[in-house]
Amino acid sequence: MTEPRFPKIRLILVGDELLSGRREDKHMAHLIGLLAERGLQLGGVEIVSDEQDEIAAVLERSFATRDIVFCCGGIGSTPDDRTRQAAAQALGVELALHPEAERLITERCADNERAGRGSGDMSLPENQSRLEMGVFPVGSDIVPNPYNKIPGFFIRDHTFMPGFPVIAWPMMEWTLDQRYPSLHHQVEWVEHSFIVFEMAESRITPALEELERRWPGVRAFSLPSMGSGRPHIDLGVKGDPTEAAEALSYLRAEVQRLGGELNP
């Protein structure tokens, strides 16, 4: 985002399994794609353990911003799922069974019974446990779940979803399209880059600094490649389309002036 009136969009990932390497995150790349389709950008990512106090501390800081946040993981009903409780703790509110969530979870249990997968009797312990997944911080709205009806929740521009991509990704898309359509394609933004050979990064750094001074709406980036293959730098600019085009021309000219070899 290049304008202050636009909130930053961030992603919070909850789970010890991510920190231990037992699972690899797939949400970040998918969210980046969803945002790009709507002319938006991801502004930050944070991973936190399953410890309730740690989640609450991260969320307390997050709720204090005006950011739009997607939080994946920890909203199930097992003891290691503590995100719902942490969100209530961070907001200083109680937890309560959401009436619409209760209705949807009851429907899901009835669906299971009709399919021969359990009972729709909501007094059974396993179904009482399922209802726990509809216990949200007071003041929350539900986030629809087209996969199995068990909803996520939304409060203070934070959307809370399970860690399963098949459930979380439709929730992300629904939230972007139903809650934030006014933000889509409101900021024109482009990214250009090219490959440079035979140049040390330190030689082009002054030009990158000068570029950002001349074109305040543009950010430069330099991504050197190391290891196997011919050493090179992926140089580029991103930001306002008009300024970015001017800055790109300047950067290419500086590379050539300094003796760098551009890719064909």
Image (tube, rainbow, N blue to C red):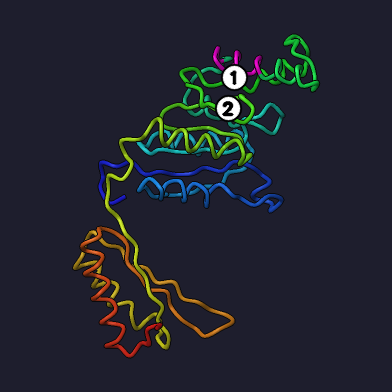
Q: Quadrant of residue 129?
A: top right
Q: Which residue reaches farthest bottom?
A: 259
- Looking at numbered disc 1 in the image, what kind of residue is underneath it? Val
- Looking at numbered disc 2 in the image, what kind of residue is underneath it? Arg
Q: Are marks 2 and 1 in contact (CB under 8 Å)?
A: yes
90 to 43, vertically: above or below: above
Q: Quadrant of residue 196?
A: bottom left
Asked which secondary structure carries label 2, the reply is helix
For residue 84, the mark is 2
Q: Is residue 112 left or right of residue 136?
A: right
Query: How many residues crowd around disc 2 within 10 Å: few (fewer than 14), some, or many (20 or more)?
Result: many
Q: Quadrant of residue 176?
A: top left
Q: Is residue 196 left or right of residue 94?
A: left
Query: How many residues crowd around disc 1 within 10 Å: few (fewer than 14), some, or many (20 or more)?
Result: many
Asked which secondary structure carries label 1, the reply is strand
64 to 114, vertically: above or below: below
* Residue occupying the point 45% across, 38% down: 69
Q: Is residue 230 magenta?
A: no
Location of residue 263 in the rendering, given as x and y in whole percent from the top left corner:
40, 82
Location of residue 132 in the rendering, given as x and y in whole percent from the top left corner:
65, 20
Q: Quadrant of the C terminus?
A: bottom left
* Residue occupying the point 31% across, 45% down: 185
Magenta part of the chain: 98-107
For residue 232, the mark is none
Location of residue 21 in the rendering, given as x and y in whole percent from the top left corner:
68, 53
Q: How many marks?
A: 2
* Residue occupying the point 47% across, 25% down: 91
Marks 2 and 1, the one that precedes in the sequence? 2
For residue 135, the mark is 1
207 to 179, vertically: above or below: below
